Image (cartoon, rainbow, N blue to C red):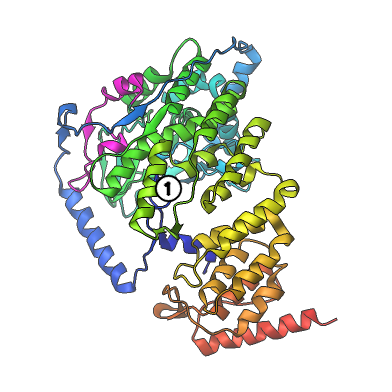
Amino acid sequence: MFSLSGLRRGIVRRARSVRFARAAVTILSPVALAIAGIVLIMVVTISRRAAADTLSTRAALQSPPRVRLTTIPVVKLPPTTPLTTADAARIKHLIRQLAQIDHPDVVLSAPTYSGTGFAPLPRFKAPDVMCVGDPDDPNHPGASALTELVRLGPRALPFLLEALDDSTPTKTVTRQGMVLMRFLTRMDTNPTNAREEAALATLPRRTLSPFSSDPPFQKTLPRSSRHIRSGDPEPYTLTVGDVCFVILGQIVGRSYAAIEYELGFPGVVVNSPTHDPELARAVRAVWSGPDPARRLLDSLLLDFATRGVLQGDEEDARWSDFGIGSDPQAGAALRLLYYFPRQAVPLVVRRLGELRVYDCAIINGEWRSSADRVRWEKRELANGVSTEEFIDAVAWCHRPAVQASLLSVFQRTDDPDIMIATLPALDREKHGPLVRQKLGGALRRQPPEDRIWTGDGFAILRALRQFGGEKVRPLYREYLNGASGAQRRFTVCAVLQEFTGEWDEEFLWPMLSDKRVNTVFYDHPTTAASEKPRLLMRVCDVAAETIRRHRNDVRFEMVGTEPELDGQIRRMQARLAASSTP
């Protein structure tokens, strides 16, 4: 079923450490999909025939990524209250409950570079490496236990480390199906952390396949002890120890991924401390100690002092290396505020005050000129962090000093992405006029027409609706009236699909007569029995689909010829007219 919220999957994500890198739309035709399938089969076949992976020594690796380390803050930590017998028993019970996990959601490994997945905070509920249980069911025992263990943080660390080799099976079974499965020993690190680097050096390195070189910036040092080939019946059951590995990563700000799909390798990789004792030993060597709170605090302070730098000439590699310094810093700011708020607030407030937050004339991921690009690079490099990501990582905090600093950031920036990142810290009533003024101005600066439905205009409109509610309706009118083309109508449909239907009558009902097609090549099948032939979506089609999502008394299915869809729309219009009659 067509979903406008899924349109963003059709846009190549802005480079993870460079939120303002180029956005491009990739539309795969059936022929392209067929070619991709053939290539995948060839890769799988060659990978299966490959001999044992070539061992690589540390000396053969490229130089590790460069980062810049500033002065590490000195923070005094008062003595922590010892755990009682009841506290320890409760934590052990929570770990046992992890065996109830019955639904892992594994994700592509690219997003796992970031350490911002953090289960206790709703804004960061989707973890970087694994989501367990039904996200809509907070009473799921396994999911709630995971969230609570992350919330406990340093108090749970010793118990989680002890349980890394707990082979108790969960209810989650990963089947290889039509892809390969590999067991690796992958441990994410901050390269400035000597303890982590020493532990990392104990793990031997193998490549996944002749097509995967595991770039050093991923800090990937895998070990392959078993190769499950395509079609083999053997599944893998996630263990309690594997889930503890994931929880540890969320606490300390590392991308510890138990199960993930791997880019550059046609299959699934499993990082299991219960399967590979070397991984469990390395993780324990980093995080074990007599004072778990002090160990965690020292690591977070080191991460907080890490800055990203640029090196090399190739754009993607330069900014990937920048993320090695940027990501730990943003993740540390979040965790310092959560676990050590009294000590962290002055550090975060000072850091927010140092950030350069001027706009860099980026529209939908594109710079208006080379000078604007240079201006953006200078800003990010001076900040030593992805500015938007750092602000996003701390905007949840309700401490007055942090909120005041974020308000100051909002007031002095003219960058719409940074404005949007600060909104969780602002008061809807008190700051509403200021938000409407500044984001409204950013909306007016959008180009009259753009081929991207879900670009900057989408982000601004969505943020306005979330923050301002009914008071921002005039800005939607102004946006639609500001251009005669169809793109803005598609964009408004995409935004309104994420909300309820109070605005449908004013904005969407008139679009049911607009038969202009999109220029992004989003299309739909003409018959349910086959994916071909396909037709470009029209404004009226997307508006009808959005209305259908808001109402139970109308029907619309985006399958059929244009006359067939027109018939569905006419019936919808008649039903809407009848429902609005006094």
Q: Is residue 290 visible?
A: yes
**Residue 221, percent from left and from top:** 27, 32
* Residue nearest the observer in this picture, 284 or 214: 214
Q: Is residue 226 left or right of residue 4?
A: left
Badge 1 crowding class, 10 Å Cα cut-off, few under 14, some 14 to 19, many 20 or more, is: some
Q: Residue at x 38, y 23 (%)?
A: 283
Q: Quadrant of residue 209?
A: top left
* Residue nearest the observer in this picture, 154 or 93: 154
Q: Is residue 175 visible?
A: no
**Residue 415, percent from left and from top:** 52, 51
Whether residue 517 appears in magenta in the rendering, the answer is no
Residue marked by disc 1: 107
* Residue nearest the observer in this picture, 40 or 80: 80
Q: Is residue 433 left or right of residue 582?
A: left
- Highlighted range, magenta: 192-221
Q: Residue at x 59, y 69 (%)?
A: 492
24 shown above or below 243: below
Quarter holding the C terminus is: bottom right
What is the residue that sits farthest to the right in this orientation? 582
